[in-house]
Image (cartoon, rainbow, N blue to C red):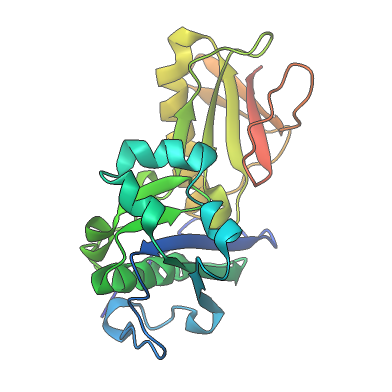
Amino acid sequence: MIDPWLRPSFRPTGRDAIVALIAFADEDVLGAEPDLRLGAALPESAPVANLDLRVHHHAVSPDWIDGWRTGALRNLAARKLDDLGRLDAASCCYSIAVAAEDPADLTHLQLGWAVAAAIAEAGAFAILDAHAANWLPGPAVASLSPHRPFTVQQEVSLTAETEPVPGFGHPVHTRGMVKFGRPDLVAGVPADRIEETGRILNHLARMLAEGDNLTPGQQFRIDGRRVLTVAPYRPGDTIPELNLNNDALLLADA
């Protein structure tokens, strides 16, 4: 039996949670009628009917496939993958999508990773977590234990931009909170607060992943001294556009 990843603080919001993984392979490693044998790798309550698994061949959809391995995503791949030449030469990839309506647990996320692990075991050598903008080598995904506990740091990317934005500071932000049906988190801070802010965002991301919610106007105190106010994230003259592909909340010192 595989234990479901629970959301002990779940509060309904009406938002969809969306998982999107892209698995690259040298060739079609699944064949015409794939049998992924997921039963032993999933909680019984996993929403298998919500899975959308498709194969994409470069000969048919070159622009779609190349869009996942060029530009900023390629720069990220260079940090995480050993062989970019193999990524460039891959003739096909698989899209793994799971959407869940306001889920009270995270079995949709377990489903997405179980499918990715099965495809990696079949021969896919690189997996892109599209919403988190995170690459993982195929063998690392194939070896994921279905019994592992939920870890928010493995699901959400935390980025601190090295260049400050005038009037805003260094952007520190999450990517991937749409996987939980929650907004991403953004802050602008001076250089000496980047590390502390990263810890705060990790903590809040865990809260949201477990089902809690933040609302504009809400305030909370950090370490008994720093008060943060939650506001909608709206890029503008002094607030940078971070291209999160998700709505977000801005955390600002009160």
**Residue 2 in the image, given as x and y percentages of width and height:** 28, 75
- State the residue at coordinates (59%, 19%): 188
Question: Residue 107 location, x and y as percent?
Answer: 44, 70
Is residue 49 shown left or right of residue 136?
Answer: right
In front of the other: 126 or 5: 126
Residue lying furthest right: 237
Residue 192 locus on image (x, y percent)? 44, 8
> Can you say which quadrant of the picture contains the C terminus?
top right
148 shown above or below 230 = below
Counting from the top left corner in percent of width and height, residue 194 is at 45, 17
Q: Does the rendering let one see residue 215?
A: yes
Above or below: residue 146 compared with residue 209:
below
Quadrant where the N terminus sits is bottom left
- 123 over 63 or under it: above or below: below
Can see residue 151?
Answer: no
Q: Choose top left, top right, bottom left or bottom right for residue 250.
A: top right
Q: Nearer the viewer, residue 157 or 106?
A: 157
- Answer left or right for 128 relative to 167: left
- Pick whichever, 100 or 213, lies toward us: 100
Name the residue located 53 percent from the left edge and 84 percent from the top edge: 49
Vertical placement of 126 versus 2: above or below? above
Furthest residue toward bottom = 33
